[in-house]
Amino acid sequence: MRKGETMPVPAHHIVATPPPFDAPPYPADIFAGQTVLVTGGGSGMGLAMAKAFAQGGADVAIMGRGIERAQEGAAEVAALGVRTHAISCDVRHADAVAAAFDEAETALGPIGLLANNAGANFPILADDISANAWNAVTRIAIDGTFLCSTEYARRRIARGEGGAIVNNSAQYIWTGFPGDAHSAAAKTAQATMTKKMAADWARHGLRVNAIAAGFFPHATSTAGRREGGTEVLQNMIPAGRTGSIWEFGWLSAMTCTPLFGEMTGQIILQDGGESLRRSLMMPDYVPPRERAEGPWAWQ
Amino acid sequence: MNGWLAGKRARIEGGGPAMADALAAAGATLVASDADIWVHVAPPPAAKAAHDLTHAEWRASLDAGLDRRFLGAKEFAEQCRARGQGGAILFIGAPEQALGADQAAAAGALGNLTKTLGVEWARDGIRVNSILTQETGPTLGHLAAYLVSDYAAYVTGAVMGIALDD
């Protein structure tokens, strides 16, 4: 076997799979009459969240850095039969966030639910992360989640209504992620602020949870651009497959349903066992700097 | 309520009728033997300072909160493998730090056992998760049903609570 190559999942292994996209776990009206705002909702995991909320009947405000991608995502969500509105917003700026919420509420009514997905993530050595790159990745996730969550919470508290936030965190928040220092820091901050905000806002009926997500390939994910696609990655993961993007969307939306109405401050791991896979005897350690195929070793 | 567990057979050990009702409401058939789902609910031990616990009390908490769970899970996994089908295991109990040192030891051990078995049995199609909570309301039943359903097919080795202080 060539270095860097992996075997397919053996035929005698049993791989657990989710129901198909058109069979969501909740009724089509569970979010009826509510509007969700999804940051970074134009593509990838944010779009999966947006679609999951739409499958429960929520109208969806899709926020993105660029309006074109937000509009493309909104069109896909609208095809599920809900009202949508696309907004351009840089979540690192409080004024821009407030203006975006105003625009979304004018178009779709009060924002009742919030999904924080905006983020960036790419393989890079810590040595090569410029101050600008560090600031961009950490502030989109850390400051962006703070600014959007607090803008949302102030509005809900002012209305005297509860609500729910779900944050897209990552499977590597407990272990670090060599070759991705900025995202390792940022995603853990999202998870730890999730718990504290849940405590701060419990008395207002606002719930805050996060999904520590594993690898859910999509058109714009880094690994999606890998030569040979993601097929070769299936056998690396204990579950025997990468995640299906809609099962991530469903679990995210599920935390915001009344079915999980008592849940708050939780970080739910959904990674097919990927972050837990280990053995005391493992292949030689190669520093990210010396990995032939890049910092994540499979670029 | 929903059809999350339609066609699934669930075996529940411990706990009250609420968990059985929740799984049945999600469409599961409750059985006493061959099952696709095994849910183990451990009773919360009394909250006592460590120096007030007798060894017998300590042992009883570890028996119910850890040892029986491992042995039961092992037996369930063997049955799944014998049938050539996957399955789902769910451990339910009190949070680590909520009661006494006996619970802290049992729940801590259970958490890391959950992570270990989730990976060890992943390619048998057997998922292993834990809910450590003091909540007894409807979310517990819904969350339990979700975790043992195919909707949670990518959730294994996960340990979670429900409320803030879980």
Image (tube, rainbow, N blue to C red):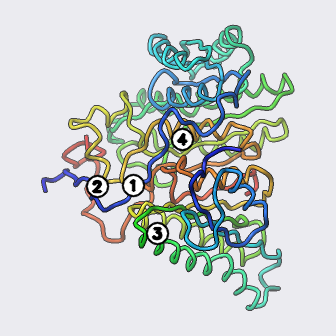
Q: Which residue is mark 1?
A: A15
Residue at the location (40% across, 64% down)?
B124
Which dot, 3 or 2, sits closer to the camera? 3
Where in the figure is residue B22, as x and y percent of width and height? 72, 55
The answer to whether the residues at label 4 and label 1 have Cβ atoms under 8 Å apart is no
Q: Chain of mark 4?
A: A
Which is more N-terminal, label 1 or label 4?
A: 1
The answer to whether the residues at label 3 and label 2 have Cβ atoms under 8 Å apart is no
Local secondary structure at mark 1: loop
Q: Is circle 3 on the same chain as circle 4? A: no
The answer to whether the residues at label 2 and label 1 have Cβ atoms under 8 Å apart is yes
Give how far apart the Cα atoms at labels 4 and 1 are.
24 Å
Q: Which residue is mark 4?
A: A169
Which is more N-terminal, label 1 or label 2?
A: 2
Regarding residue A147, the answer to whether it shows in the image is no
Which dot, 4 or 2, sits closer to the camera? 2
Which dot, 4 or 1, sits closer to the camera? 1
Give how far apart the Cα atoms at labels 3 and 1 are.
13 Å
Regarding residue A42, the answer to whether it shows in the image is yes
Q: In the picture, residue B161 is in which quadrant?
A: bottom right
